[in-house]
Image (spheres, rainbow, N blue to C red):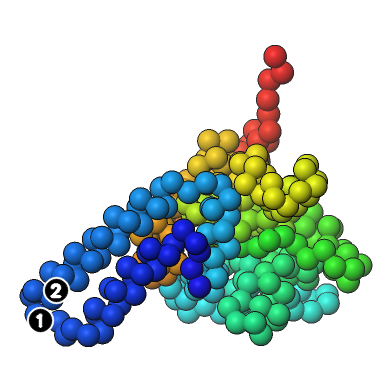
């Protein structure tokens, strides 16, 4: 499945894949033709993705082929061991949490997971965490702190689950507790918005020393659909709502909400999961090197100061 503005790219990609299947390597003439097709694909991708509006970025952030948390975990880290349960109620599969190695460094990895197949999506509640998911994240973060491990979080959720059961089990309290715990962790923390960063459900894992964002990800207080319903009571106003929310990576970098934009291969990460993971891994290494040079007090102080500055304005 590809988006309307990707049809031309899809046709070019099919030609490239067909060419690879039909012709064996070693034929120099055919290899030249293949490289020409690949150059044409890259040029067209750059042209298409460079002119997208905010709503089209939203569609890309929700793309069904876009890499999810578990894709990045398997491609970036080694020896991932997942922990389950919050020690209070149960295990929430919409949040994945555990320990792994980034190169030779042990780290805690926590992230929302939407799932691929219909069965997986149902099991993972479409990436919308329950309170037990946030309590599991807190448990793993505190464990990481006790062993002086950096914490890396992956954000990809339309928002926290708003169901009656979740509210009865303390959804808002769990999110608030997560915000508090992640604010005062005495270890380096990096948050990465890899797809859809929706409302408090995303922010619960988004308090970090460094917040990175993939170039086609979105991060917002409300979805464009919710914004259009509240402001205009009209779902045809999705494009206007997307623009007004300033939810793209470029907008958020200007506003100081994020620290760096991570480029996506071929203009969008769903074309090449492995290359997207390699690029992100380079950014994680860079920021971890910088953060590991700071002591615990510095890390907490800088993190608190970073969020205190957000939303400050001067009234003329």
The mark that comes first in sequence, 2 or 1, is 1
Residue ranking furthest to the top: 316
Give the labeled residue for mark 2: 31
Mark 2 Cα within 10 Å, few/some/many (few <14, many 20+)? some
The numbered disc on residue 26 is 1
| Residue shown at 58% from the left, 36% from the top | 255
On screen, residue 206 versus residue 8, left or right, reads right
| Residue shown at 65% from the left, 82% from the top | 118
Residue 130 position (above or below residue 27): above
Instruction: Locate residue 213, reporting x and y percent.
Output: 52, 52
Residue 264 position (above or below residue 164): above
Decide if residue 45 is in sight here: yes
* Towards the viewer: 142 or 267: 267
Instruction: Locate residue 274, reporting x and y percent.
Output: 38, 70
- Kindly check if marks 2 and 1 are in contact, taking CB atoms under 8 A apart as contact: yes
* Label 1: element kind: loop
Residue 39 position (above or below residue 80): above
């Amino acid at each position: 499945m590809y988006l309307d503005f990707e049809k031309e790219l899809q046709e070019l990609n099919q030609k490239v894949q067909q060419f690879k299947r039909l012709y064996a390597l070693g034929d120099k003439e055919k290899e030249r033709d293949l490289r020409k097709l690949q150059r044409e694909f890259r040029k067209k991708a750059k042209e298409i993705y460079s002119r997208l509006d905010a709503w089209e970025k939203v569609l890309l952030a929700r793309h069904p082929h876009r890499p999810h948390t578990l894709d990045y975990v398997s491609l970036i880290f080694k020896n991932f061991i997942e922990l389950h349960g919050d020690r209070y109620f149960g295990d929430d599969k919409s949040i994945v949490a555990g320990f792994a190695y980034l190169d030779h460094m042990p780290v805690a990895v926590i992230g929302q997971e939407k799932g691929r197949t219909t069965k997986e999506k149902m099991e993972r509640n479409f990436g919308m965490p329950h309170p037990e998911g946030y309590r599991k994240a807190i448990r793993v973060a505190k464990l990481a702190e006790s062993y002086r491990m950096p914490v890396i979080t992956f954000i990809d959720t339309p928002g926290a689950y708003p169901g009656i059961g979740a509210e009865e089990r303390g959804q808002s309290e769990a999110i608030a507790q997560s915000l508090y715990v992640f604010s005062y962790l005495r270890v380096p923390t990096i948050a990465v918005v890899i797809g859809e960063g929706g409302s408090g459900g995303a922010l619960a894992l988004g308090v970090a020393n460094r917040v990175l964002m993939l170039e086609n990800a979105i991060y917002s207080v409300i979805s464009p659909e919710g914004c259009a319903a509240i402001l205009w009571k009209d779902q045809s106003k999705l494009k206007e709502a997307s623009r007004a929310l300033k939810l793209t990576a470029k907008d958020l970098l200007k506003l100081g909400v994020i620290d760096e934009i991570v480029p996506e291969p071929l203009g969008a990460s769903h074309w090449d999961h492995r290359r997207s993971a390699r690029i992100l891994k380079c950014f994680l290494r860079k920021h971890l090197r910088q953060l590991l040079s700071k002591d615990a007090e510095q890390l907490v102080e800088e993190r608190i100061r970073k969020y205190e500055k957000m939303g400050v304005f001067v009234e003329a």
